[in-house]
Image (cartoon, helix red, strand yellow):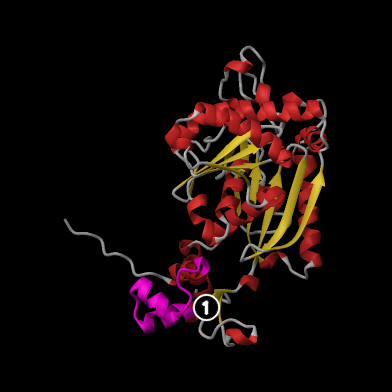
Amino acid sequence: MTLAPVPSPGAGDVLALIRSGRATTRGELGRVTGLSRTAVSARLATLEQAGLVVEGELESATGGRPAGTLVLNAGAGLVLAIALGRSRSQVAVHDLDGTELASVSHEQEVGAGPEVVMPVVVRHLAEMLASLGRTADDVRGVGMSLAGVVDAGQVMSVDSPALAGWDGVPLEPFVRQVTAAPVFLDTDCNVMALSQLRVAPTTLAERDDALVLKASTGIGLGLVADGRIVRGHRGAAGQLGHVKVAAAAGLPCRCGDVGCLEAVAGGWALADSHVRDLVAQAVQGNGRARAVVRESGRHIGEALAAIVIVTNPRVVAVGGDMAGAFDVFSAGLREGLFASTTALAGRDLQVVPVAHGERAGLVGCAQLALDAVLSPAAVDAALADLRS
């Protein structure tokens, strides 16, 4: 049997090493890739000509980058982030390093439907680009999130009880009004998990095996294993809110079934108004609100325990509106979780707030787009188009 030759690392692979910080000098790139000095220089020349890489010319003592250090040129393009929830849409513009340059948070009933919501989103994006002095040509990709199960290929929701009127509606045509760049769609929990991966290198051990819980109007889970998002066969992994629990026996869920965790722990079932009002009352010391928030955490912890036993994460990171009362909510979560999990699975387990707080959705959407447009294959394809 003849084995196919292993392809030589291309310019896209070199950029990935520079972007991750694994290799930031010509010498390091040669050692990591096995490429000759001439081959490294050729790939760097291609990246520099495309404006994707810049090389330090000043010594660090003068305040610049150390001489010879290679970095991604964050200003070489933009990505747009669109995080849509039931009652709030968040949109932002980020540079290629993931730094947020401008953002808008807009309160509205997303359940009103895409025909109402998306034109407002598009208008905000266009206004932010104009305020930054940038154009649609600067946009390299768009990262977008929705609650429920999505079809990433068709860029639409396929099963979201939280977003009535969104299922089956293609969203890319709306985005085309502001940019022709590719659109990447994922669930709100998965992008929150992506944001958890974008933390300081010192916390690598804590981020690579994690459960990222979104406890808000609904309840969902982002699963991280060995530094990768686990999406499941049909992209439907993480639907924790629709796990059947004894406490919800016979109670109707908004999904149309009965007995779901959300029926006793989801914000829609706990508060007559928005769950953020309940959380605010808990933070202010309202005894009843604190009891309701803590009990929600306890129910979720009990349901989460089996997943902790099976996946053995290092961290459970809590986001969503309930994280606004983290101390109260996490007390209940820990109570239910540690009472129901095994000693080994719970031995080193930490329960922490998500890394980026209320910005986690935006950070994750930006990361979704960046991981796609700056992947080695995408970079090599883009460079090939420039040469043709």
Q: Amino acid at mark 1?
A: Leu
Residue 213 seen anywhere in this rendered image of the structure: yes
Give the x, y percent position of residue 328: 70, 35
Q: Residue at x 81, y 25 (%)?
A: 272
Q: Is residue 358 above or below residue 382?
A: above
Q: Is residue 191 left or right of residue 126?
A: left
Number of labels in the image equals 1
Q: Please give the name of the residue rendered at 81% of the width and 47% of the height, measured from the top-left corner.
A: 106
Asked if residue 153 lies left or right of residue 129, the reply is left
Whether residue 40 is in magenta: the answer is yes
**Residue 221 horizontal/vertical position (percent):** 57, 37
Q: Does residue 269 appear left or right of residue 77 in this picture? A: right
Residue at 61% from the left image edge and 35% from the top image edge: 220
Nearest the camera: 206 or 256?
A: 206
Start and end of the magenta stretch? 19-44
In magenta segment, residue 163:
no
Q: Is residue 310 visible?
A: no
Q: Position of residue 250 (x, y in %)?
A: 63, 12
Chief SS of the magenta region: helix
Depth order, front residue of 224/204: 204
**Which quadrant holds the N terminus?**
bottom left
Residue bearing the label numbered 1: 70
Dot 1, how many residues are within 10 Å of its Cα: few (below 14), some (14-19), or many (20+)?
Answer: many
